[in-house]
Image (cartoon, rainbow, N blue to C red):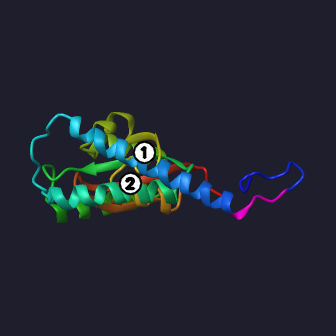
Amino acid sequence: SILSTSPSSPHLHPLHISISTMNRFLLALVSALLIVGTSAFAPNQPPTTIRHSNIDTQRNAIWDTVNSLYNNWGKKATASHILFRPSQFPEDEAKAKLLEIKAEVGGDPEKFAAAAAEWSGCPSSKDGGNLGEFGPGMMVKAFDEVCFDEDVGVVHGPISTQFGEHLILITKRTGEE
């Protein structure tokens, strides 16, 4: 068969690599559809002050998730964040305060956790902003890009998402090549 290799042959047929890549892409696509598709069953949330076109969001969400799953296949990240919701501060004030906090905490995880507990508008603030471990495509695009593309052990941000303004501390990433 064109796909079989002999046990003594250390090389795979080039077609096998193509099928492997295609399987990886299909798995990423199916995963993305499952992740994005389940949001249809989530309870309706009250509208926030930041509004995006639902059509643009839905159109890009699937592609962003597939792209992240494909590019970061096998990786996991562990991160903490500080979130300023639009209801807490206007955008400019939020960014200024986050820059102030960023300068105060440096890359110290204990100082970051204390600042998250004091300032963050996310329920994770009770745990020092710790979001735990997550895979690619599980967070919104801007957050996902930081967690899987930027340096570990560094505070990144302010990062803008539809939830507000964030500082992100990536504490660990696995699955790197």
Q: Is residue 7 or residue 77 the one in the foreground?
A: 7
Tell whether position 116 is magenta: no
Query: What residue do we see at 25% from left, 41% from top?
Result: 39
Q: Position of residue 123 (x, y in %)?
A: 28, 36
Q: Locate residue 92, reporting x and y percent.
A: 18, 66
Q: Residue 108: x and y, percent?
A: 49, 51
**Which part of the image, by quadrant, shows the C terminus?**
bottom right
Q: Secondary structure at mark 1?
A: helix
Q: Circle 1 is placed at which residue position?
A: 31
Q: Toward which corner of the image does residue 160 lie, by quadrant?
A: bottom left
Tell me where residue 140 appears, x and y as whole percent: 33, 53
Q: Residues within 10 Å of mark 1 (few under 14, many from 20)?
A: some
Does residue 92 appear left or right of residue 110 in this picture? left
- Label 2 is placed on what type of residue? Thr
- Callout 1, which amino acid? Ser
- Relative placement, left or right, of 34 versus 96 is right
Of labels 1 and 2, earlier in sequence is 1
| Residue carrying label 2 | 65
Real-space Cα distance between discs 1 and 2? 8 Å
Query: Magenta residues?
Result: 10-14
Check disc 2: other Cα within 10 Å, few if <14, some if 14-19, many if 20+: many
Residue at 33%, 38% in the rendered image: 124
